[in-house]
Amino acid sequence: MVKAKLPKKTVRVFKFTGGLVGPSLPMLGPVADGGTIVASTAPGCWGPMITPKFKGGHEVTQPVAVAGAEVGDAIAIRIRRIKVTSSATASGTMTFVEGRYMGDPFVARKCSQCGTVNPPTKVVGIGREAIHCAVCGAEANPFRVPSGYTIVFDDARALAVTVDQGVANRLAETASDVAVLPADSEQHSILSLALADIPGVISRLRPFIGNIGTTPAIDMPDSHNAGDFGQFLIKAPHEYGITKEKLEHRTDGHLDIDSVRAGAVLICPVKVKGGGVYVGDMHAMQGDGEIAGHTTDVSGEATLEVHVIKGLTLEGPILLPPAEDLPFLARPMSKAELGQARKLALECKQAYLEEALPTQVVGSGANLNDAADNGLERMARLMEMSVDEVKNRVTISGAVEIGRLPGVVTISMLCPAKQLEKLGIASLVKEQYGL
């Protein structure tokens, strides 16, 4: 008889999944309910994208089971700390190279010369054509960078500057060391491409986690665990092709919402036993929308505290961002504002005033309109309201904000406290905002 593993207060994660998430992947842990996950993360997006053996566009950590988490529950993930360890990275806009993939260049890559599917590759020299097939030697990067940059960070990880070609070339010579790739990471560093089209740009760091959440109910590429990128899987001509209906098994872990940073709480659906919390795709900074398609992927360390919420069945994540990241209309009312509201209600003989608390629901879809509709419908089901009522409330006490193009948004709203009590999260919301 195999004994069940006892929950641990802290689970440290150093290994990665090769671009996949799903129930077939073994989990670490379990970590105790209320315990801590410390994850060493590898860059997402460009590094995995130029590493054709990967079957997804990211390199996320091995999932961790949370003790007591059953299908139909939720897991609240408190992001306690994010530390950027890379001293530089590179990024840019993207195009595809025809003939080097089968339907999806993020998943089903192939060598256009020898035909090897998801071929092993090696870095030969530096520059945009440095990725070569290890089988036949042909150049094998399925992506091109029309406009790219290399960016360096100060020691405090507070400011950043894009560099010229000479600096980019020097950094490319020791790309893996500069990126501080974790020991078990298998990606090529994007720094090897020596991108330097826009030198001298100054920016601030504001790190956050682009791909974080719980394991979906089916295996899928990690970058496609969302309603927009997941569209590429529908009827795809590779092993991860699915029907439109099966996309509902996603957990929307690939968020790219810049307020998923230290101080935020992300409440995620449990769709497999144990939940399977994973993390990856840390970014140094990003404007809303990730308009270039990609941003500054970095190595780092994330410290997460996890709590099981029994019986809270979710379709996708609820986000409680840091207070300063809430839209103006969705911020909690101050004591002075509540006093003024009572006075106004009394003057016009309005007997009832609702107690309301800020909550964000994530929506995703093929485009921003579909994502907004998805988020509004999710909010309506959670709040037990009509979509029309949610639209009215979001208009006067909330906002719709873009997480990522083409289709991830947040729906923010001051929600009735009574309904949040019913869902079992009112105390969590009040704690988050000091109420």
Image (cartoon, rainbow, N blue to C red):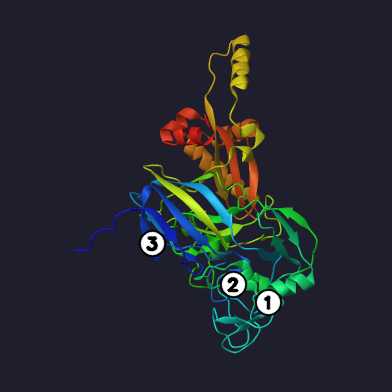
Q: Quadrant of the N terminus?
A: bottom left
Q: 365 or 159: which is nearer to us? A: 159
The three-letter code of the residue at mark 1 reads Glu
* Residue 112 coordinates in the image, percent (x, y): 63, 84
Residue 103 is tagged as 2
**Residue annotated with mark 3:** 27
* Residue 234 coordinates in the image, percent (x, y): 53, 64
**Residue annotated with mark 1:** 173
Quadrant of the rendered image containing residue 118:
bottom right
Closer to the chain start, of discs 1 and 3, is: 3
Q: Secondary structure at mark 1?
A: helix
The three-letter code of the residue at mark 3 reads Met
* Residue 320 coordinates in the image, percent (x, y): 54, 41
The three-letter code of the residue at mark 2 reads Gly
Closer to the chain start, of discs 1 and 2, is: 2
Cα separation, mark 1 vs mark 2, equals 33 Å
